[in-house]
Image: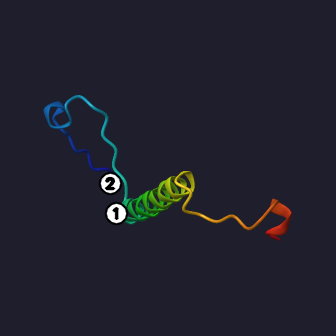
């Protein structure tokens, strides 16, 4: 049996509204946290690199392997 729910336009200010399962929402929240954390670390690393606070001991990418 399908359930129909009417949501007033005033509540969404005319924007589109989507519904997702809680499990999927929580997974998206975890992924968002991980991406934000990674991006913050990348920004911090780039800032330190520009400031000369890092040491590079590798001359080419083939040395990393």
Q: Nearer the viewer, residue 16 or 45?
A: 45
What count of labels does the image hold? 2
Q: Position of residue 15 (x, y in %)?
A: 27, 32
Q: In the displayed image of the protein, which residue is found farthest to the right? A: 62
Which label was assigned to residue 35? Answer: none
Q: Residues within 10 Å of mark 1 (few under 14, many from 20)?
A: few
Q: Quadrant of the N terminus?
A: bottom left
Residue 5, horizontal then vertical, whole percent: 22, 44
Q: How is the image coloured?
A: rainbow
Q: Could you give the CA–CA distance between mark 2 and mark 1, rounded to whole angstroms? A: 21 Å
Residue positioned 82% across, 60% down in the render: 60
Which residue lies at the image location 39% right of the left edge and 66% below the top edge?
Answer: 23
Q: Residue 24: name its quadrant.
A: bottom left
Closest to the camera, between mark 2 and mark 1, is: 1
Q: Which residue is mark 1?
A: 22
Which residue in the rendered view is the most extreme toward the bottom? Answer: 65
Residue 41: x and y in percent read: 48, 61
Helix, strand or loop for disc 2: loop
- Residue found 48% across the figure and 56% down from its top: 39
Horizontally, is 32 left or right of 64 in the view? left
Q: Is residue 39 shown left or right of residue 20?
A: right
Q: Looking at this rendering, what residue extends furthest in the top direction? A: 14
Nearest the eye: 23 or 50: 50
Q: Quadrant of the C terminus?
A: bottom right
Label placed on residue 1 = 2
Whether residue 6 sits left or right of residue 59 in the image: it is left
Residue 43 position, x and y percent, is 49, 54
Q: Please tell me how crowded label 2 is: few (under 14), some (14-19), or many (20+) other residues with Cα within 10 Å.
A: few
Q: Secondary structure at mark 1?
A: helix
Q: Say left or right for 32 vs 65.
A: left
């Amino acid at each position: 049996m399908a359930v129909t729910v009417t949501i007033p336009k005033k509540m969404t200010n005319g924007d589109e509204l989507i519904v997702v399962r809680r499990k999927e929402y929580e997974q998206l929240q975890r992924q968002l946290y991980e991406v934000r954390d990674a991006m913050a670390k990348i920004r911090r690393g780039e800032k330190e690199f520009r400031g000369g606070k890092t040491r590079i001991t590798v001359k080419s990418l083939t040395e990393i392997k």
